[in-house]
Amino acid sequence: EDQVTQSPEALRLQEGESSSLNCSYTVSGLRGLFWYRQDPGKGPEFLFTLYSAGEEKEKERLKATLTKKESFLHITAPKPEDSATYLCAVQAAYGNNRLAFGKGNQVVVIP
Amino acid sequence: KAGVTQTPRYLIKTRGQQVTLSCSPISGHRSVSWYQQTPGQGLQFLFEYFSETQRNKGNFPGRFSGRQFSNSRSEMNVSTLELGDSALYLCASSERRHEQFFGPGTRLTVL
C-alpha cells in the first residue's frame, strides 16, 4: 500500500525565515509526486509535479525537490500569504489515477 | 478555462438519510476522482471515473457510490448516512494520468 508521511505537522515561521518541509513516501513504482497548497475551507491548489529523482521545480518562493525516498518543499523568505497547509501526494506507476496523500504540513508565517 | 465546480457547497443531513453531491470537471477533462477529507484521516481516495466507467475504488463501504455522465459530469451518493460521514468531499478532474485539479468541495455535516 502506498504511504506518505509529512513532517513537521505544523511550523511557525517569522517572515523571511526560510525552511523546508519533508515528504517521505513508499510506493510500488512512482509515476509522479505532487505538491498542493490548501487554504482553510478551500480545495487543494496544484503546485508541482515531480517525476524522477533529481528533478527540481520552482515557483516564486517555493522549490520542490525529489529523491528516491522523499521530497522537500523549500520555502525561501516566506511572506504571510504563504501561510497554508501543504499537501504531498504520490501516484503509482501502474494501473490507476489514485493519489495517496500525506496529512499535510501546516505552515504559519508571522509578520 | 473554468475550474472544477461542486454543488452544493454545504449540506446538513441527519443520520439515516442519503445525499447526492455533484461535480462538473474542467472542460475537456474526462477523468473525475472523488476524495473524502477529515481532520483525523486527511484526504482519502473514494473512486475514479473515466468515460462513464468506474476505474478504481478506495476502501470505503458500499454506501458510497458514484456515476459519471456522457458530458463527464459526476455525482457521488452516500446512503444511510452516519455521523462519521461528516467531512469535506472533494472532486478532482484531470486529463488521464496528469495533474488533478480540485474543486472547492462540499462540506457535509451529519447530525
Image (cartoon, coloured by chain):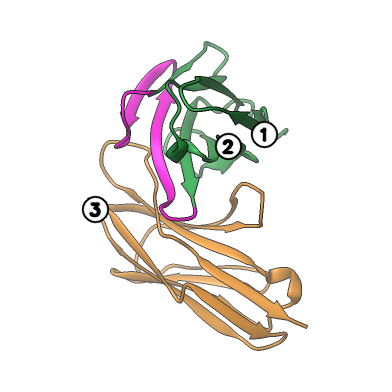
**Secondary-structure class at tag 1:** strand
Task: Please report the residue visible at 65 percent of the width from the left and 75 percent of the height from the top.
Answer: A108
| Three-letter amino acid code at the position of disc 2 | Thr
Spot occupied by residue A46 in the image (x, y as percentages of width and height) = 58, 52
The quadrant where residue A39 appears: bottom right
Residue A14 shown left or right of residue A50 in the figure: right
Using the image, determine if residue A47 lies above or below residue B83: below
Spot occupied by residue B7 in the image (x, y as percentages of width and height) = 66, 27
Q: Colour of chain B?
A: green
**Secondary-structure class at tag 2:** strand
> What is the spatial separation of the Cα atoms under label 3 and label 1, in whole angstroms?
38 Å
Q: Which residues are magenta?
A: B39-63
**Secondary-structure class at tag 3:** loop
The one of A87 and B40 positioned closer to us in this rendering = B40
Tell me if residue A34 can be seen.
yes
Q: Label 1 marks which chain's residue? A: B
Question: Mark 2 — residue?
Answer: B109
Q: Label 3 marks which chain's residue? A: A
Spot occupied by residue B6 in the image (x, y as percentages of width and height) = 64, 30
> What is the spatial separation of the Cα atoms under label 3 and label 2, in whole angstroms?
37 Å
| Three-letter amino acid code at the position of disc 1 | Tyr
Task: Please report the residue visible at 68 percent of the width from the left and 84 percent of the height from the top.
Answer: A77
The quarter of the image holding the C terminus of chain B is top right
